[in-house]
Amino acid sequence: DGGITQSPKYLFRKEGQNVTLSCEQNLNHDAMYWYRQDPGQGLRLIYYSQIVNDFQKGDIAEGYSVSREKKESFPLTVTSAQKNPTAFYLCASSLPDRDTGELFFGEGSRLTVL
Amino acid sequence: AQSVTQLGSHVSVSEGALVLLRCNYSSSVPPYLFWYVQYPNQGLQLLLKYTTGATLVKGINGFEAEFKKSETSFHLTKPSAHMSDAAEYFCAVSEAFYGNNRLAFGKGNQVVVIP
């Protein structure tokens, strides 16, 4: 079945450590996104990529980095510069189809900083 | 930039009663509108969407929503709540028709169903 796989589902890290969250999709979608979810805050866009080797900052990119070397993969690194990294992170993908605009989501990764 | 307002972070509804979740949007161009549902510790699942055409949209699990341009609204309803409807619901808007596939989400409504 086609879909989006995020790993790990749960992750703990000590302050000052970088951590990378994996996102892989086999939907053959061109565009991929990373959102951060905090209780009562909805989803906020961190980074997005519309094509391989290209990505743009979203609304809350500070303290995060991404790469898009392959169409299927869009990993997110949470760096030590991110002041409050504990959150639920969601990866999504979409076709660049002007007639849909729909995002398909992975199951999420919950990061806890100890 | 587009934005969404969802009022009432927590909504309680009795089993069998009407579910009504309100969504108002702001967009400088004709929008695409979405409702997503999220169960605990899971990703988001599409309930329904409006792109063009009929303004009353039917989705999964008996939900429907009506696009009202004059009111800039896209409220979600279900005639009779079921215990399985307990989840968080997000309204979202995009300007995909104009090449901007970024979705802006509301802050969500946590729905509690009372037996």
Image (tube, coloured by chain):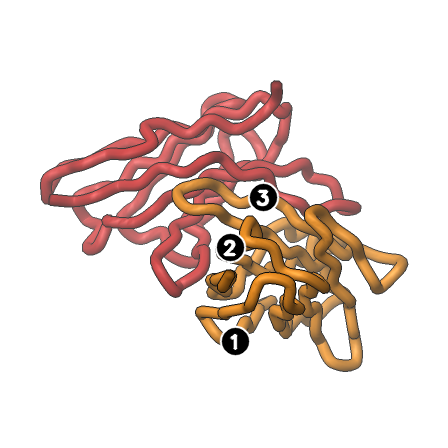
Report the quarter where the N terminus of chain A lies: top right
Q: Is residue B2 visible?
A: yes
> Horizontal and vertical percent for residue A105?
53, 39
Q: Outermost residue, front direction?
A: B115
- Residue in front for this viewpoint, A88 or A96: A88
Residue in the picture at 65% in, 52% down: B100
Neighbor class of circle 3 (other Cα within 10 Å; few <14, some 14-19, many 20+) is some
> Horizontal and vertical percent for residue B107?
47, 65
Q: Is residue A11 above or below residue B22?
A: above
Q: Amino acid at mark 3?
A: Gln
Q: Amino acid at mark 2?
A: Ala
> Horizontal and vertical percent for residue B73?
70, 74
Tell me, by letter, which chain the rendering colours red.
A
Disc 1 versus disc 3: distance between alpha carbons? 21 Å
Q: Is residue A71 visible?
A: no
Neighbor class of circle 2 (other Cα within 10 Å; few <14, some 14-19, many 20+) is many
Residue in the picture at 21% in, 43% down: A112
Residue in the picture at 74% in, 63% down: B65
Residue in the picture at 63% in, 74% down: B24
Q: Quadrant of residue B1?
A: bottom right
Tell me, by letter, which chain the rendering colours orange.
B
Q: Which residue is mark 3?
A: B45
- Residue in front for this viewpoint, A42 or A65: A42
Q: Nearer the viewer, mark 2 or mark 3?
A: 2
Q: Which residue is mark 1?
A: B7
Disc 2 versus disc 3: distance between alpha carbons? 14 Å
Q: Which mark is residue B86?
A: 2
Q: Nearer the viewer, mark 2 or mark 1?
A: 2
